[in-house]
Amino acid sequence: MRYLQKKESEQRSSAAEKLREHDIDALLVGGEPIKDENKLKTRLGTLVMLTPTDSVKDRLAAFYHWNDPQALEQAVMVAKAQKINIKEVKRWSDKEGNTEKYQTFLNLLKSKTN
């Protein structure tokens, strides 16, 4: 996790305001909005989290688009530790145009599971 610098934080805030002006208030993974979410109620409020499947897709997006090897490792770690919808990850990967890199993820996942 990294902390946003003030200028970057202001830019993101400005971008979020522009999205709200157009009634767009969704998180995206690749080119798709996140449909499902996990909620955890605490005494301080409700924390909204990505599902494990969306978390894997988020990490794979970084691998697919920026060739980030740490993101690939993180996707594998989440997939090993949590139940994910692998068919959904494949469908999304194909739609993102990253079938070959999905296969890299799948091969690494299988090698780490054995």
Image: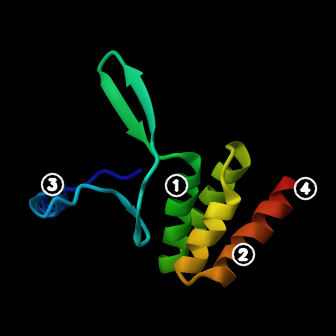
Residue carrying label 4 = 114
Q: Does label 2 or label 3 sit earlier along the sequence?
A: 3
Callout 4 touching callout 3 (CB < 8 Å): no
In the rendering, at what x and y percent does residue 105 appear? 70, 69
Residue carrying label 1 = 54
Q: Mark 2, residues whose alpha carbon is within 10 Å: few (<14), some, or many (≥20)?
A: few
Residue carrying label 3 = 6
Front-most of residues 91 and 55: 91
User: Which of pointers 2 and 3 indicates the residue nearer the eye?
Assistant: 2
Q: Mark 3, residues whose alpha carbon is within 10 Å: few (<14), some, or many (≥20)?
A: few
- Say which element carries label 3: helix
Q: Which mark, by number, is residue 104?
A: 2
Q: Does label 2 or label 4 sit earlier along the sequence?
A: 2
Q: Could you say which quadrant of the image residue 112 lies in?
A: bottom right
- Say which element carries label 1: helix
In the rendering, at what x and y percent does residue 15 appear? 16, 64
Front-most of residues 71 and 23: 23
- Any part of residue 67 in sight: no
Q: Does label 2 or label 1 sit earlier along the sequence?
A: 1
Q: CA distance from mark 2 to mark 4?
A: 16 Å
Q: Does label 3 or label 1 sit earlier along the sequence?
A: 3
